[in-house]
Amino acid sequence: MNSPLLKLFTHPSDAWIEIRRAEEDHPQQYLPRLLVLALIPALCLFVGTTTFGWSLAGDERVRLSMGSAAQLSGLLYATTVVGVMLMGVMIRWMSRGFDAQPSLNQCIGFAAYCATPWFFAGVIGLVPIRWLALIVLVAASAYATVLLYGGLQTFMRLRKEQAMLFSTCVWGVGLLLLVTILVSMILFWTHGLMPEYVRPASLG
């Protein structure tokens, strides 16, 4: 079951071929993976913000109450799943301008697999080190871009020139969607749910 996921990091070209075949045989086979993998950053963030806290200044850490951390993690999980599905809808819509006619399920599946590096990078939510989190997220973003540009031609069965242009469009729309949905989530959590902070704990 997890073989294509592992191959995305070892042999991505072969992985995309297997994923395309699996999508044709079972159009919604991506859904269980998406729902499970999206739990990784949400659960890690919950543990990190309630147990270890995040360093904001000096030698102090700020933690969240259990209720506020659960709200934040739930929002992150919902935002992740909805964001991937919206990205799939956008890919399906943009495909009309190219020689590709993927189904909506195939487009959502492709978006979910491209987002795999971000899912695993969510483990960094356990570690209250900002610079390390930044490095990990940048690396995940870079590899997600590699998967996008390297996989879209195979998955959509496009010519190389078309795939390059299509991938660039997907990348641009994806960046806009990512920023929009994350900012909306943070604003809603901050101003709508009113998070409850626990007094700072010493780093020692």
Image (cartoon, grey):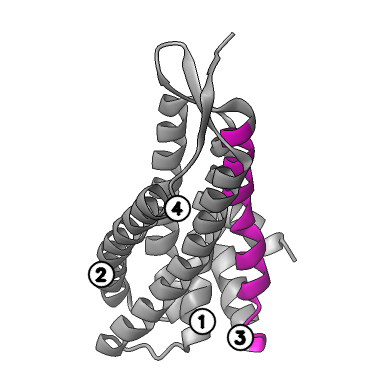
Pick the residue in front: 194 or 169.
Answer: 194
Mark 4 vs mark 1: which is more N-terminal?
1
- Return the x and y of residue 31 as percentages of the image width and height: 62, 74
Mark 2 vs mark 1: which is more N-terminal?
1
Which residue type does callout 1 highlight?
Answer: Gln
Q: Is residue 9 magenta?
A: no
Return the residue at label 1.
106
CA–CA distance between discs 2 and 3?
24 Å
CA–CA distance between discs 2 and 1?
18 Å
Q: Is residue 16 above or below residue 72?
A: below
Give the mark toward the camera: 2 or 4. Answer: 4
Pick the residue in front: 91 or 20.
Answer: 91
Query: Which class describes the residues within 10 Å of circle 2: few (<14), some (14-19), or many (20+)?
Result: few
Query: Which class describes the residues within 10 Å of circle 4: few (<14), some (14-19), or many (20+)?
Result: few
Which residue type does callout 2 highlight?
Answer: Cys
- Return the x and y of residue 195 as percentages of the image width and height: 47, 43
Q: Is residue 44 above or below residue 14?
A: above
Q: Is residue 161 above or below residue 63?
A: below
The C terminus - image quarter: top right
Residue 193, label in figure: 4
CA–CA distance between discs 3 and 1?
7 Å
The N terminus - image quarter: bottom right
Return the residue at label 3.
27
Return the residue at label 2.
169
Question: Looking at the image, do the residues carrying marks 3 and 1 touch, with CB atoms under 8 Å apart?
Answer: yes
Query: Which class describes the residues within 10 Å of circle 3: few (<14), some (14-19), or many (20+)?
Result: some
Give the mark toward the camera: 4 or 1. Answer: 4
Question: Looking at the image, do the residues carrying marks 2 and 3 touch, with CB atoms under 8 Å apart?
Answer: no
Question: Looking at the image, do the residues carrying marks 4 and 1 touch, with CB atoms under 8 Å apart?
Answer: no
CA–CA distance between discs 4 and 1?
35 Å
Q: Which residues are magenta?
A: 25-50
Residue at horizontal 55%, vertical 52%?
Answer: 71
